[in-house]
Image (cartoon, coloured by chain):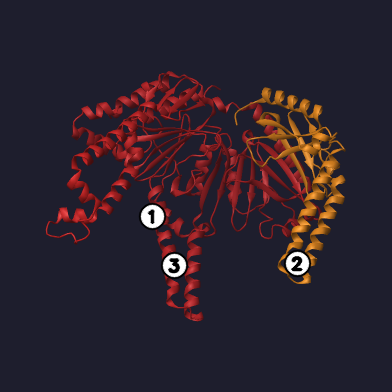
Amino acid sequence: MTDDAPAASARLEPVTGEWRRVSPKYIVVDLVGNVISGAVATFAASLPVWLLNWGPWWWLLTIGVGVVSLVLVALTPRRVRSIGYLLRDDDLLFRRGIMFQRFVAVPFGRMQLVDITRGPLARALGLAELKLVTAAAATGVVIPGLALPAAEELRDHLVALAETRRAGL
Amino acid sequence: MTELADGEWHRLHPATPLLKGGIALIAILGIIVANLRERLVEWLIPGAECPPGVCDEDPISIILERYLLLALLGVAVVILVVIGLFWLSWRMHTFRVTDEVVEVRSGVVFRSHRKARLDRIQGINIARSLFARIFGAAKLEISAAGSDANVQLAYLSSANADGLRAEILTRASGVRARVAADAVAAAEAGEGLPVGTSDAVRANLAEVARARLAEFTAPELDPNLAPPQSVVTMNAGRLIGSTVLSSGTIMFVAIVVGVLVAVSVGGAGGWAFFGLIPTLFGLGSYLVNRVLKSLRYSIAATADGVRVGFGLLSTTNETIPPGRIHAVEITQELLWRPFDWWTVRVNLASQSSSPGAAGQQSTTILPVGSRAEVLKVLELVLPSLVTDETRLLIEGGLAPARPEDGFTTSPRRGAVLRWFSWRRNGFMLHTDAVILRRGAVWRSLTVVPTARTQSVAAHQGPLERLLRLAKVRVHTVNGPVTASIGALDVGDASALFRDAAAAGVVAIRADRSHRWGSA
């Protein structure tokens, strides 16, 4: 742990270290997801105009939603690159987000279970998602875009660590 | 030692079906009476004639006239079958308590078998509803973490429930101390109450009545098993005052005033008042309920954790072993400030099925108390935290901010996000706990023991980045308390994040509270 965090900087950077990043292939998965959800949202926003015949001003809503979706899609590569995790001696650190940054520290002794899930697209690319579950619902640590062997190795490592540090709830 | 915890399978109180089905039975009786009221009137008042056309073509009359024997036989068979089923379900419902687990088997057609490890117990609750108290029975509920994870033993005889609770707690704690066993034995001997119902049946009626009376008037805390004094005494005046001055009541007054203004100025008709009647009833029952439930509130330390008891007619008595409280929050309603009243809420991993004091969630362990009482309660629930040195610091956490009070507060620019409270909004990291102080209008103090934190998070959004601020949240199990503090300087937030995470790791390593007695 380093104590020389840049206090003068406005950016939140509580822990500096060698963050492990997720696979660049995950950009594709996230991009496809964002394009689909953006298209659906834009389509839904256009419904009032051609289903209910509301005035032309309602096109603005469609345009607005479309623009926001495009920005989200354009930022996807950066957002994926911002995801990182760091294994320390006693806990796992997780970070994500550029606009809305989030750092989480999960002690190994607090992990109740470690989950691996794979969507169809991620499976095609050989990726997997690792989910850490603690007794607190708010922990919400999901590390996406790990190569399957790496994810399985990490899971086994974490489970073994959790077993040695296990305490009560 | 109670013979129920000898590792063999035991059955519940014989009156269990009656107690569980009591309400249903009364309801069925009510339906029958309602449907036959003409006939009942005729039976009771012979002069009152049944209107022609009602009794003649009544199916009951036809049955009585033509198939009397068959009808009687049918009723007898139904009653026998119902009694038989109840008896069968009672017979099939067994439990046992071993050194490691408590198990319950139940069900006739669909069998269920539930097992709970004793070292995972989050709390033990003894509830005595008014109906059950008449029969001298009690419901013992052993809570485990998670929703619907509790093991219920409903019903046991009252004394058995107390004995079993003491025994389970002793085993769960990891000590097999002779002292505890002696204490239980002494308690059972000293009480002179019937231990099993079979004894009670044999005893003559007057004795039974006396025993019931003794149970009714006995204090909720068994004097032999727990230090008798509750650290808080609830008085009716404060209870009523705090309820009247709560935000719910203020809202009600605001609605009444609104309606009055609407009637007098807007010309809305008098019918508007009718809309208030349901609200009035709701408020009335809430007030009465709250006062009745909390009047005999007590909280005390036992060897096996904090014991919270309350209730005047239906009583509940919950024991929370050490290390089962995941977060504590002390809050104050706006109008309570002149009186210096506070409420204490906690996060627990288990969810008790019986409501807590004042008809609120069972997580409200002190419905209303003075500052001194709040500190006493805090001392009970977090013994390692409240010492002579930290007492002043914690008291400072309830007061307005002062310089050098130990809290790291928001910088001046935090006022953009925390308009009034930025001076007070701050945190303090103790070796055993993270303490967060928030709010200027609605003051609160949140304490999370570091041995119970699940994870720590730091957040920053775009606006916060512009202001060089950040937010830190300490994750605990779900409950009414959310330990999060925003509008901190980025450097302070980073330090809190790092230190809270590190303190959590150290505390987890040192934590032995799942077997609290073995240390």
In the image, the chain rendered in red is: B
Q: CA distance from mark 1 to mark 3?
A: 18 Å
Q: Amino acid at mark 3?
A: Leu
Q: Position of residue B266 (x, y in %)?
A: 51, 80
Instruction: For the C terminus of chain B, give its image quadrant.
Output: top right
Q: Residues within 10 Å of mark 3 (few under 14, many from 20)?
A: some
Q: Which residue is mark 1?
A: B288
Q: Is there CB contact under 8 Å for labels 3 and 2? A: no
Q: Are marks 1 and 2 on the same chain?
A: no
Nearest the eye: A82 or A3: A82
Nearest the eye: B500 or B128: B128
Q: Position of residue B459 (x, y in %)?
A: 75, 47
Q: Which residue is mark 2?
A: A49
Q: Is residue B422 above or below residue A93?
A: below
Instruction: For the N terminus of chain B, give its image quadrant.
Output: top left
Disc 2 sits on a residue from what chain? A
Q: Residue furthest front?
A: B66
Residue at left 82%, top 45%? A32
Residue at left 80%, top 38%? A121
Q: Is residue A83 above or below residue B280?
A: above
Disc 1 sits on a residue from what chain? B
* SS class, disc 1: helix
Q: Amino acid at mark 2?
A: Val
Q: Are marks 1 and 3 on the same chain?
A: yes
